[in-house]
Image (cartoon, rainbow, N blue to C red):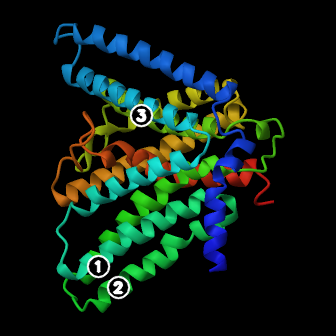
Amino acid sequence: MDLLHASLSTILTAPLLAQQTAFLLDGATGILLGVVISCLLIATGAGQILRRQPDSSVNPAIVQAFIRRVRAWWLMTAILAVTFTIPSPVATVILFFLISFWALREFITLTPTRLGDHRTLFWVFFILTPAQYVLVAMGQSQYELFSILIPVYGFLFIAARIAVAGDYKRFLERIAKIQAGLYICVYSLSYAPALLYLTDWTDPEYSTKSTAGLLFYFLLIAQLSDLLHFVCSRLLGKNVIAPNINASRTWEGFFAGTGVTAVVGAMLSLTGATPFNPWQSAVMSIVIAVMGAAGSMAMSAIKRDRGVQDYGTLVEGHAGVLDRIDAICFAAPVFFHLTRYYFTTASG
């Protein structure tokens, strides 16, 4: 009871703690948001111009994909901007919880489940997933627990619970699918809102700024790198990385897209929304781009294995939620731990 009372007290006082850590949009985050909106306006105009060009000069498939991605960016930016204006990071945590819940649903529905899995899935959806985000919302005081809840306790629980159900058919395949879905869609993605709770920065000046800018920077770089990999592969690509997995991803597009992402990341550091200087931001952008590309390839491999084209049909132009956040899921835990280890005193 004492532990439950302490947990509830921590969550209920989160708005006050958020105000003390300047969660609301500050000047640096506002500048970054302004840069993004300006770029989206330019991209929207460019898309409309390209759409009016003859099909012989511009590939209409590329133009249409570009326009749809820009529309999705507008939606993502608007939602994040609204949650950032609420004087508590809990609102953003709830947003990511809902995204995780829906993404996990898409992942699980890729293959049929057996009756013996249903009670396990209840625990996964309604106990483990909310518990992960509750621990994230409790801040860095619960870092040790939220960082191991799913990969240790969740991993073991899923195998044991399905075994207790008494159904041994395709046992290994079934537990692996549920474990992978929980790990990618919930555990990995939860590290994105966890960025809001990082404290004890090595740079005293950044300690006075909003961590909302850091999260927005991460999401922007992750999505930008995904778009650049796609566009550069279409325009420059000759050598496909894995034709049977994703025919639109090439080595030329990967290196060109990652390089441009690094340059953009270095420029965004000048807004002051992150604790990185230009070269550090360039390196972190490369890490995000590489992990994001790995995530896109891995999730494409899963779709090919299951014989489907997309994970769902919720987001226009990107089929499902999981199709849109695959890069974020793979990049979030790596970016979080690099930031925490090298730019805060938490590991010191």
**At 33% across and 26% down in the image, what residue appears?**
71
Circles 1 and 2: CB distance less than 8 Å?
yes
**At 59% across and 30% down in the image, what residue appears?**
265
Q: Position of residue 262 (x, y in %)?
A: 57, 31
Q: CA distance from mark 1 to mark 3?
A: 34 Å
Q: Farthest residue toward the right? A: 204
Mark 3 residue crowding within 10 angstroms, few (<14) / some (14–19) / many (20+): few
Q: Which mark is residue 76?
A: 3
Q: Earlier in the sequence, mark 2 or mark 3?
A: 3
Q: Earlier in the sequence, mark 1 or mark 3?
A: 3
Front-most of 320 and 62? Answer: 320
Q: Give the structural element (helix, strand or loop) at label 2.
A: helix
User: In the image, 16: left or right of 34?
Assistant: right
Q: Amino acid at mark 3?
A: Met
Q: Position of residue 140 (x, y in %)?
A: 68, 59
User: In the image, is residue 175 above or below residue 341?
Assistant: below
**At 62% across and 68% down in the image, what residue appears?**
7
Q: CA distance from mark 2 to mark 3?
A: 37 Å
Q: Earlier in the sequence, mark 1 or mark 2?
A: 1
Mark 1 residue crowding within 10 angstroms, few (<14) / some (14–19) / many (20+): few
Closer to viewer: mark 1 or mark 2: 1
Q: Position of residue 301 (x, y in %)?
A: 28, 55
- Asked where in the image residue 77 lies, by quadrant, the reply is top left
Q: CA distance from mark 1 to mark 2?
A: 8 Å
User: In the image, is residue 121 above or below residue 50?
Assistant: below
- Which residue carries the number 1 mark? 119
- Which residue carries the number 2 mark? 161
Q: Position of residue 53 (x, y in %)?
A: 22, 7
User: In the image, 197: left or right of 223?
Assistant: right
Mark 2 residue crowding within 10 angstroms, few (<14) / some (14–19) / many (20+): some
- Asked where in the image residue 28 lies, by quadrant, the reply is top right
